[in-house]
Every structure is written in C-alpha cells, then in structure tokens.
Image (cartoon, rainbow, N blue to C red):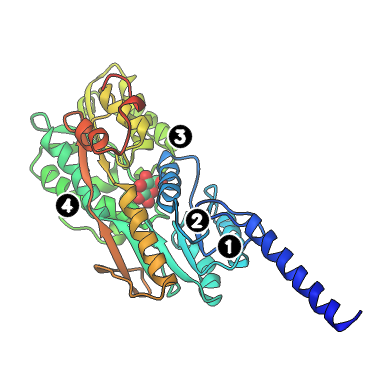
Amino acid sequence: MKKGLKALSVLMILALVTVLAAACGSKNGDSGSSSKVSIGIVLPTKSEERWIQDEQRFKDALKGSKYTTSVLFSEGSSAKEAENVETLINKGIKVLIICPFDGTAAGAAVKKAKDAGITVISYDRLIMNTDAVDYYVTFDSKTVGAKQAQYLVDHAKGSGQPLYLYAGAATDNNAFQFFEGSWEVLQPKIADGTFKIANSSEAQALASKATLTHEEEAKIIGQVTTLWDPNEAKNKAQTHLTAAAADMKGDVAILAPNDGTSRSIADVFAADSAIKSYVITGQDADKSSIQYIIDGKQSMTVFKDVRTLVKDAMGVALNILDGKTVETNGVSNNGNKDVPSKQTDVISVDKDNVKEKLVDSGYYQASDFKGL
Ligand code: BGC
C-alpha cells in the first residue's frame, strides 16, 4: 500500500472508531459495554425502594452533564458487587461511587479500583477496614436512630409499655450507627420503667448501660436483626408475638430500622388481636411507607433527602475530575483510617408533616398517594 493511502486509511479507521465510541457512550445514564465511562456508580440491590430512589435521583442529577456514567446494581451479593467494580474498571472510570452490600467484603473490590488509580467514594454506607476509600458521603445516621427512638418516647403510653426492638444487617456499619443513636435515647426510658423490653434478652441484660460498646451492640443486633430483609423482619415479628406473654401485648412500641422492614413488621402486629395499638418507626420515606403513614399503618419515617446525597457524591466526583479541591465537613473512622466525610441532616416525618416535607417540598407528587 502506498504511504499516502496508508495514512488516509489509518485516519478513516480512527474516525470510524471515534464515531462508534460516541454512539456507544451515553451521557446522563447507562452506557454501552465497550464505551468509556468517567464515573461508575454501584448500588446494593434493586429489591428495596430506597436504592431505586437513589438510581432515579442520580439520573435526574446527571441530566446535561458532560461526563458519562454507568449505574450497576449488586443484587445483594458481594460477588456480583466485585464483578460490577471490575466491569467499571475495564470501562476506564476515573471515579467510583459505591454503596457496599457488605461493608467489609467490599474492601477487596475497592482495593482493585484504587490500584487502578480510581478515586473511591463510599456512598451512604462506609466501606470498612481498608485504606482504599478516599471519601465518604452519607446522612447523619446516629441522628436517624435518635429520631426514631425519640418518636417512640414522645408517643409512649403510661409506664411499663412493651418495647419491641429490631435492627438492620450487621454487615452494614449504618445498622450500628442507627442502633447506637436509638439506644442512647431509649435506654434512660427503659431504666426509668417507661418501656420494658419485649423481645431481646441481650438488650435486657444490657438495660442499665447508657452507652454500649460495639461488641455489646453486636450482641443485640445479632438477636433482633432483620438483615434489611422484609421477609426476615416478618418471620422475626411472628416468632416474637407467638412467644410474647399477655403483658407484652396491648399498646406497644416498635423500633423498626427502616421502611421496608417497618411495613412487614407493622402488618404482623396489626394482625394480632391482642395488640391494641402500636407505634412503629421507619426510615427512607419510601413511597409505600408514605402511603402507610397516610393510612395510619406506619407511625413515622426518617426522611433522608437522597437528592442532597446524590448532589454531594456528584460534587465530590466532579471536583476530582476537574482537578479541584474536594470539600468535606468531617471524618469517619473505618477501622483503618479516618475517611474525609460529608454528612447530611435528616428529618422526622409523620402524618402531621408528611404533606409539607414530602409533597409541598417537591420531593414527591401528591398524585403518588391516595387520601393525602
Ligand atoms: C441505609 C438505609 C437503608 C438500609 C437498607 C442502610 O445502610 O442507610 O437507608 O434502608 O441500608 O438497605
């Protein structure tokens, strides 16, 4: 082939490759398998409303961005999560935003990303015991637990009220944060006789301790965990009510760690004729739980404005991509290092302020709900 022609065909091939790459890549959302992606996002599961909310808010936030992104779900499996991270590394991402399914197991996956020169942002849940996390964006999780507990205290009926405790998955550091925040508010009210613990001998054994160690929390969580799974929550609630003596029924208080588990626990308590009334907590402002609150089936939720979390995570990612300084407002220790962190406030919501906080604020549409 003549030199000139060869140069021309090289140019044509280059042009073709560029056109193909542009066709495969999609800004503002999922991208094709072979395209270059600048920000990779990994979320734990599609089977909880919470994480679908996050996916949608990421998509909203990315409209008009010049950067390409890809959102992958880990289907509640650390193996799938590691595979997702690998896929994103191969797509050439510069920043990884990841909410781990299991906070400790995710360490190995993000280490690979870090070794490939990628900046790692832990999203909502902290990745534990590794130095391969650069930033952490999250909500004030201890306050989530404190607000849930405060609601139970504020709505306690008389004294000696049965208190049912439930917690998140022990593989999630947030579950400890929530429980710690709740315990600090509930413990004095257990000590003064306002509440009596109905379903946890471990919590009962620690009832006089105002502050618990991580190991002590682990004992209680191990006994009353929902694994963040509504089915597990339902089974546990059924077991507890079957075992409960008559004086552990009547008007009861229930600490449920999030909305998905709250709805299934609430359904079990509502079906027991010896339960006269129940006050039950939640968190996430799932649409289904907002409907439960309107219908009087769930008492409250803790609203965590996912738009803000997405904005914070994207803000950190874009600053990294643009070579700018990243602003944080604290640190969170993950057992290996103090991770620079950004924390967002949370809001307690019940039937009295649900319209104001979730509909008038533009977070949801009134038409999403019946009877508002
Ligand atoms: C999140 C909650 C969520 C829970 C279960 C926690 O880490 O902070 O918003 O409900 O996981 O997925």
Q: Secondary structure at mark 2?
A: strand
Q: Secondary structure at mark 1?
A: helix
Q: Residue 184's mark?
A: 4
Q: Earlier in the sequence, mark 1 or mark 3?
A: 1
Which quadrant does the C terminus fall into? top left
Tags 2 and 1 touching, CB below 8 Å: yes
Query: Furthest residue to the right?
Result: 1
> Which of pointers 3 and 2 indicates the residue nearer the eye?
2
- Vertical arrangement, residue 137 with respect to residue 365, above or below: below
Q: Secondary structure at mark 3?
A: helix
Q: Is residue 105 visible?
A: no
The amino acid pointed to by label 3 is Asn
Q: Position of residue 246 (x, y in %)?
A: 24, 23
Circle 2 or circle 4, nearest the eye: 2
State if disc 4 and disc 2 touch (CB < 8 Å). Answer: no
Q: Which mark is residue 88?
A: 1
**Does the rendering let one see residue 33?**
yes
Most distant residue in the bottom direction = 3
- Which one is in front, 128 or 223? 128
Residue 326 image point, x, y percent: 33, 72
Residue 226 falls in image quadrant: top left
Above or below: residue 189 compared with residue 298: below
For the point 21% across and 52% down, which residue is it? 143
Specify the quadrant of the image occupied by residue 370. top left
Give the residue type at disc 1: Leu
Which of discs 4 and 1 lies nearer the camera? The answer is 1
Indicate which disc residue 231 carries. 3
